[in-house]
Image (cartoon, helix red, strand yellow):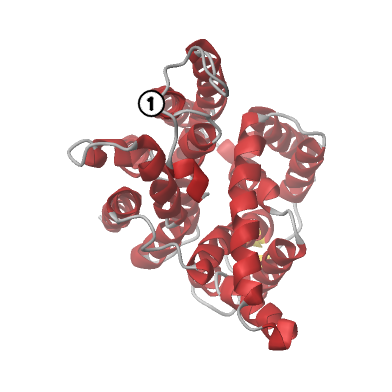
Amino acid sequence: MTEQTALPDAPGTGGAGAKPDAAVVRDALGVGVAVGLSGFAFGVTSAGSGLTLAQTCALSLLVFTGASQFALVGALAAGGNPLTAAAGAFFLGVRNAFYGLRLSQLLALPRAVRPFAAQWVIDETAAVALAQPTRRAVRIGFTVTGLTLYVLWNLTTLLGALGAEAIGDTDAWGLDAAGPAVFLALLAPMLKDTTERAVAAVAVLLGLGLLPVLPAGVPVLVAALAAPLVLWARGRRAGGAEDDGAVRGAAEDDGAVRGAAEGEDGR
Amino acid sequence: MSVWIAIGVTAVGCYAVKLLGLLVPAGALERPLVRRLAALLPVALLAALTAQQTFADGQDLVLDARAAGVAAAAVALLLRAPFLLVVAAAVVVTAGVRAMGG
């Protein structure tokens, strides 16, 4: 990834590896529109979970990271303690810090602009921006994806919430399946090698197995321990290889982000 | 009120981690183990959440129309369908199975 920190500052036309601005905008709009529209599913799910219109819209405006929003309303609907519910949503949002780390090198934003750009640091903007060849393209990709997604996601959240209130029983329309389907769609591109699959399998077992015995929201937090558990188990099996596993892990991680970027592009 | 507390805590927390990534000097979080864990944490959370929201009814595990819907979403994903179509498949199949009394 380090080689990407020294991005050419070339304009969008001319020069090897350059990409026309229009092509970047098209990529960004494709992702922004497709995912932005799914705010509708969030609005419906949130309203169906018993949140008010104001609460639903506040989540999309202020939290603006889909998986965390779905997780929060799901946990609240299940009767979870508000802080436990928030903790699950927060841990899902932690990955955005790592997108930010990569993006800050590529975007090279002035410090004063960063607090404003931060709200847009999410899966989709990272996927589009990280896939661009030049700094100009990265900036265009990030801005167009971020703006499109923010506007559409909030608009469709509002429409979804209003629609859900009009529909009444959202379960009859199968809308309670939207949440898990969104999670599955986010998860699928991440399941590339055996480590990821092992983590997912252990997390499912912990999440379902502990559900009847622990308070709502807590099993998900315990299931997060699948990540360090599997890493630890694999480290032990690697045995005398010392830090080899960790180093290889980092290399795989690089591939994972690039893979995710391609996956998102494919939407 | 407690819902607003949850929203406030989540909003502040999620914004803080986004900003953190943009502000910390490059390399500070780039330790291989930290990055590996950060990549695997969402895998664990998303897998657990998918399973729970498919099979949980309160604190009970149930097999109902949602399972069929999420299975349809999985098939759509295998067929590389776009995001919206994946969600739509889950919703439509769940509604259909429920309408048939499942």
The local crowd at label 1, few if under 14, some if 14 to 19, many if 20 or more residues have their Cα within 10 Å, is some
Question: Can you identify the residue that label 1 sits on?
Answer: A143
Q: How many marks?
A: 1
Q: Is residue A15 or residue B64 the one in the foreground?
A: A15
Q: Is residue A114 or residue A70 the one in the foreground?
A: A114
Q: Which residue shows up at 70% across the image and 34% down it?
A: B86
Give the structural element (helix, strand or loop) at label 1: helix
Vertical order, A48 against A71 (above or below): above
Q: Is residue A63 or residue A56 the one in the foreground?
A: A63
Vertical order, A68 against A196 (above or below): above
Q: Quadrant of the C terminus of chain A?
A: top right
Residue most extreme to the left: A112
Is residue A92 visible to the viewer in this orientation of the structure? yes
Q: Which residue shows up at 44% across the image and 47% down it?
A: A102
Q: Is residue A169 or residue B31 the one in the foreground?
A: B31
- Horizontal side, residue A63 vs residue A20: left or right: left
Residue most extreme to the front: A15
Provide the chain ID for the residue under circle 1: A
Q: Find residue A151 and report its image quarter.
A: top left
- Horizontal side, residue A92 vs residue A264: left or right: left
Q: Position of residue A247 (x, y in %)?
A: 60, 69
Q: Which residue shows up at 77% across the image and 64% down it?
A: A194
Is residue A65 visible to the viewer in this orientation of the structure? no
Vertical order, A173 against A33 (above or below): below
Q: Position of residue B54 (x, y in %)?
A: 67, 54
Q: Position of residue B70 (x, y in %)?
A: 73, 46
Q: Find residue A138 and report its image quarter.
A: top left
Q: Position of residue A184 (x, y in %)?
A: 66, 48
- Amino acid under disc 1: Thr
